[in-house]
Image: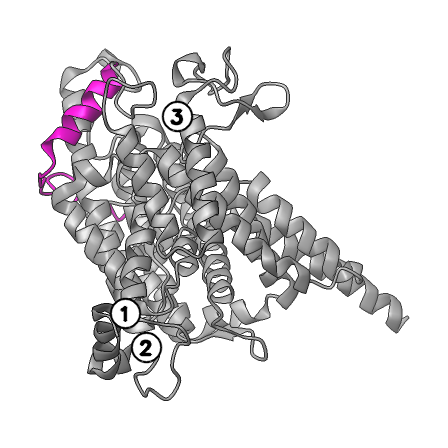
Amino acid sequence: MSWVDKLNAYVARSAVGRWFRLEGSGAPVERTGSKFSIELRAGLTIFIAMSYIISTNALILTDSGGTCDCDREEFGATCENDPAYTTCLQRMKLDMITATCAISCMACILMGVLANLPIALAPGMGLNAYFAYTVVGFHGTGKISYENALAAVCIEGIIFFVLSVLGIRQWFARLIPASLKTATGTGIGIYLAFIGLQSSAGIGLITANSSTLVELGGCPPEFRDENNVCTAHHMEGGPMWLGVLGLMLVGTMLLYRLKGAILIGILFIAIISWPRPTPVTYFPYTQAGDEAFAFFKKVVTFHPIKDTLARFHWDLTTGDFWIALITFLYVDILDCTGTMFSMAKFGGYMDERTQDFEGSSMAFLVDSVSITIGSVFGSSPVTAFIESGSGIAEGGRTGITTIVTGIMFFIALFFAPIFASFPPWATGPALIVVGSMMMQGVTQINWHYVGDALPAFITIILIPFGYSIGYGLIAGIGSFVFINTLVFIILKL
């Protein structure tokens, strides 16, 4: 017996092993295949796969302008010519890096300890863009202020908490037909792969096209215009081919069942991308590259939150405030519910009889509390992350996985320069691989009955093409209700 096996056996027999129901713990219902060492590796994999949120969330929320302001009559609507405003935005970005790490740390640890699920939480992509560019507007040009928008997020979390305590959120989730839950998982898989193929959080193989919306791109970043359209040198980008290499390496390692294949692939590509004088560097000799490299060289740093902590403005009298609150509510509830159920099904926790999963009530409570805490730190809504699938694919089965992810976010508070510097073409292959794994459930849909098949198909295609889990699920539920209600009425005539 190796030292790893001895460690796994020791932890399994301890109080920790019994609490998290590790295999061999003697708990009433053990999690099959769960071992302490695997949980550690899975948690690290999830963190690396979603570490892009540290810098990305900070960049997006900084675009809202936050608490910064200027004389807009003198400097224009967006204040871009005001040096003091620019300095304030730099401070806001550092505040948001700290806030993102802190919120994600607390949310993941709460999810792991209380719900015992390997589902990580962090400020959600999509919702942060809606918060920054639609609600508050670029540099505060929207209809409500940053502080007022935070109040809407805080109220959303409180409403979610009440709905979860009363069981209404769980009841709503159980109403979703089994075929649509399966379709949601498949749609999320394609969504993950689509993200992994793009340049913002992937290998850059797919880029924008003004005529066909998307095309086979793969050009170097300097040959993309402001709309991310490749103007020349298609399929000649070094980072893209490095990402393809990572994808092939991860696939080969998975074929030979090498433990930690996804994590190894991410780290291997990231390390190759860090040296500067190479065609595949993450730090090119540009202004943005120089700034990123200067931040990377700091290695260890900590920035206390200065401007965004508990900055609420409780003006509930405007219609725009309530539009924002309602939008946050219905998009987040469907987005989070769809992700949690898909991850539960992917991890094998779903009870096919009740169409529920173990720990769902506590998971929803943790999500709602995390949203409210996130608003206190100055962030947009927190939600479940589909990148959790990368840890589940590595064998993560318990809350230990999520606790490790939370601990890594705590470490990132001090090592943010390192963890914010994983290039998208290093993490993109992991998203594509996990996406392929999530396609397995598509065979469980009843494709012979159109009342199940068409709504399921609509859900599957609209999640990636609409770039929203919530909207895809809305379309699927709507079409399911319409078709099957019409069939019921016809049969009763």
User: In the rendered image, which quarter is residue 203 located in?
Assistant: top left
Instruction: Please state if 199 lies on the left or on the right of 313 as rendered.
Output: right
Q: Quadrant of the N terminus?
A: bottom left
| Marks 2,1: beta carbons within 8 A | yes
Q: For the point 80% across and 62% down, which residue is it?
A: 448
Of mark 2 and mark 1, the one earlier in the sequence is 2
User: In the rendered image, which quarter is residue 479 located in?
Assistant: bottom right
Q: Nearer the viewer, residue 395 or 108?
A: 395
> Is 290 inside the magenta-drawn segment?
yes
Image x and y of residue 411, in percent? 15, 50
> Is 442 inside the magenta-drawn segment?
no
Q: Is residue 364 above or below residue 81?
A: below
Helix, strand or loop status at disc 2? loop
Name the mark on residue 22. 2
Instruction: Please state if 81 lies on the left or on the right of 488 as rendered.
Output: left
Q: Which residues are magenta?
A: 286-314
Instruction: Please state if 64 lies on the left or on the right of 180 as rendered.
Output: left
Name the mark on residue 239. 3
Image x and y of residue 85, in percent? 18, 22
Q: For the point 30% across and 83% down, which residue is it?
A: 25
Q: Which residue is mark 1?
A: 36
Q: Nearer the viewer, residue 198 or 210?
A: 198
Q: Amino acid at mark 3?
A: Pro
Q: Is residue 493 above or below residue 434?
A: below
Helix, strand or loop status at disc 1? helix
Q: Is residue 311 visible?
A: no
Q: Is residue 26 above or below residue 96?
A: below
Helix, strand or loop status at disc 3? helix
Q: Is residue 109 above or below residue 78?
A: below
Q: Amino acid at mark 1?
A: Phe
Q: Amino acid at mark 2?
A: Leu
Image x and y of residue 71, in percent? 20, 18
